[in-house]
């Protein structure tokens, strides 16, 4: 077959896969009509992945600058995680965790507890991040009922917070795009000020903003503490609201307030845990431990759906009883799946054997240096970094933000780059395995894409409009 014919076959195959997907698959977080028409957002049929790269059916490659929605820590088709899963496949693929147990879930629970020094000694498993949020909310509510305080059934979340899209998780989410459509289904939650450092006034520091936000939380607790079950926060970075970053001082203050007013602290580390913010658990940066930690995404290395909630022994003991009604009434069919747990164990082994947290600090410095032209760009505001997360805000009008994000995504693909802005916020959350050339290319390509997109928009005195 000639080269031209081979190319034609590949193009037909690609077109076929895209058409079949659009016909049969309802894609998440997507307005499906955006994939249709003359200005359609591309739908990329992925063939395989290697390291930090995804490859489509035509052989084109894309540097995965967002770790495939923040899950892939050590690259696609990682040999060590692959080997662990292949070994596990020959032993046990799944068994129910009610009345049974198995080595991978025991070892994973023990390992995670040891990483907290035993403070959080019990793990409850599920499959996705939203389910972990649901579990933590239900555990807190049920604990207070078991403790003779059934009136403590309200929750506090932060302005701009995101904790998932199931009904309970959505009730403590404050992103209008996700919440408004389903408002009538949701319980009320108290929304308090975000410690987003971008709110700092002239002469104020990020720590000052944190203190102002903590004061707002205390006002709510002073009024409602007797009714509040828990405060739920995303430590250090509120991701889905545009990578809003805050000072660790906020975590210290919230922990103290929760102790003072006798409410639980839930740390949603689904996106920001597993080393993403610099320490394995984001709360470690403030030298505090919450009452519940929710983990998902990176815990399995991006391989298999897995989530879990870690909690303290006193919470666990609040359910320990002969009465079934006082037990925690929650279950998932695939709870503690052995394959997912084995992937998580392999992920933790890589952290330990490769000194990942130390290596990430070196990589983070290199990536920050590679992004300096963007940090100093006249059309960029609020360049920021926390651990292995970078973000900056394009100076665009609110009305142009959605057009900017789609145009950026489409243009980035042409530069062999997968980046998916949130409105006018461009963020990077790459895998932890980038080499020097990939870091350099990431910086150069992101700058080229940004300049190309900005050049395609008209500058006004108030910003940029489409």
Image (cartoon, grey):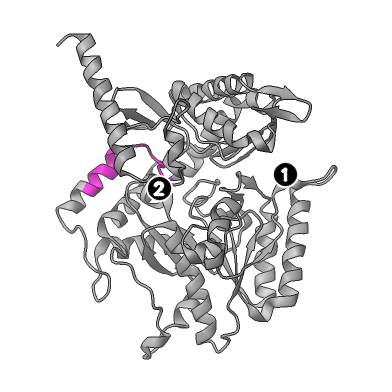
Relative to 365, residue 188 above or below: below
Q: Earlier in the sequence, mark 2 or mark 1?
A: 1
Q: Residue at x 45, y 21 (%)?
A: 414
Q: Is residue 83 magenta?
A: yes
Q: Residue at x 59, y 39 (%)?
A: 423
Question: Does the rendering let one see residue 449?
Answer: yes
Q: Quadrant of the N terminus?
A: top left
Q: State left or right for residue 452 relative to residue 36.
A: right
Disc 2 target residue: 352
Q: Quadrant of residue 37?
A: top left
Foreground: disc 2 or disc 1: 1
Residue range in magenta is 71-85
Q: Tag 2's secondary structure? A: helix
Q: x, y percentage for residue 109?
A: 37, 64
Relative to 374, residue 21 above or below: below
Q: How many marks?
A: 2
Q: x, y percentage for residue 14?
A: 28, 27
Q: x, y percentage for residue 401?
A: 62, 36
Q: State left or right for residue 199 relative to residue 405.
A: right
Crowd tier of the residue under label 1, counting other residues whose Cα lies within 10 Å: few below 14, some 14–19, many 20 or above: some
Q: Tag 1's secondary structure? A: helix
């Amino acid at each position: 077959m000639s080269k031209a014919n081979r190319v034609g076959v590949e193009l037909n195959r690609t077109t076929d896969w895209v058409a079949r997907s659009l016909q049969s698959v309802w894609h998440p977080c997507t307005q499906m009509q955006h994939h249709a028409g003359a200005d359609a957002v591309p739908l990329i049929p992925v063939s395989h992945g290697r390291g930090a790269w995804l490859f489509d059916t035509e052989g084109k490659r894309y540097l995965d600058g967002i770790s495939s929605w923040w899950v892939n820590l050590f690259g696609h088709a990682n040999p060590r995680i692959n080997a662990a899963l292949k070994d596990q496949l020959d032993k046990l693929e799944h068994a129910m965790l009610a009345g049974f147990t198995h080595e991978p879930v025991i070892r994973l629970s023990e390992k995670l507890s040891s990483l907290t020094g035993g403070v959080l000694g019990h793990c409850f498993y599920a499959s996705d991040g939203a389910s972990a949020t649901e579990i933590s909310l239900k555990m807190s509510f049920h604990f207070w009922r078991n403790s003779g305080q059934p009136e403590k059934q309200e929750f506090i979340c932060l302005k701009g917070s995101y904790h998932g899209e199931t009904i309970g998780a959505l009730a403590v989410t404050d992103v209008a795009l996700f919440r408004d459509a389903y408002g009538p289904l949701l319980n009320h939650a108290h929304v308090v000020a975000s410690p987003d450092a971008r709110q700092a006034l002239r002469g104020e520091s990020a720590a000052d903003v944190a203190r102002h936000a903590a004061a707002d939380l205390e006002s709510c607790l002073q009024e409602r503490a007797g009714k509040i079950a828990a405060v739920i926060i995303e430590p250090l970075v509120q991701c889905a609201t545009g990578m809003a970053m805050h000072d660790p001082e906020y975590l210290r203050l919230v922990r103290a307030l929760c102790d003072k007013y006798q409410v639980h602290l839930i740390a949603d580390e689904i996106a920001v845990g597993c080393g993403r913010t610099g320490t394995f658990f984001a709360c470690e940066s403030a030298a505090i431990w919450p009452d519940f930690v929710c983990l998902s995404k990176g815990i399995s290395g991006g391989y298999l759906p897995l989530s879990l909630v870690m909690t303290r022994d006193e919470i666990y003991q609040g359910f320990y009883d002969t009465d079934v009604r006082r037990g925690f009434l929650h279950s998932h069919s695939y709870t503690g799946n052995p394959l997912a747990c084995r992937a998580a164990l392999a992920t933790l082994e890589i952290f330990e054997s490769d000194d990942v947290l130390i290596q990430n600090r070196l990589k983070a410095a290199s990536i920050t240096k590679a992004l300096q032209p963007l940090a100093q760009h006249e059309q960029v505001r609020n360049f920021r970094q926390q651990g292995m997360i970078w973000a900056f805000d394009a100076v665009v009008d609110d009305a142009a933000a959605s057009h900017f994000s789609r145009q950026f995504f489409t243009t980035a693909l042409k530069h062999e780059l997968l980046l998916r802005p949130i409105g006018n916020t461009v963020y990077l959350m790459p895998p932890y395995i980038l080499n020097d050339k990939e870091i350099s290319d990431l910086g150069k390509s992101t700058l080229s894409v940004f300049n190309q997109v900005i050049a395609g928009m008209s500058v006004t005195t108030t910003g940029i409009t489409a």
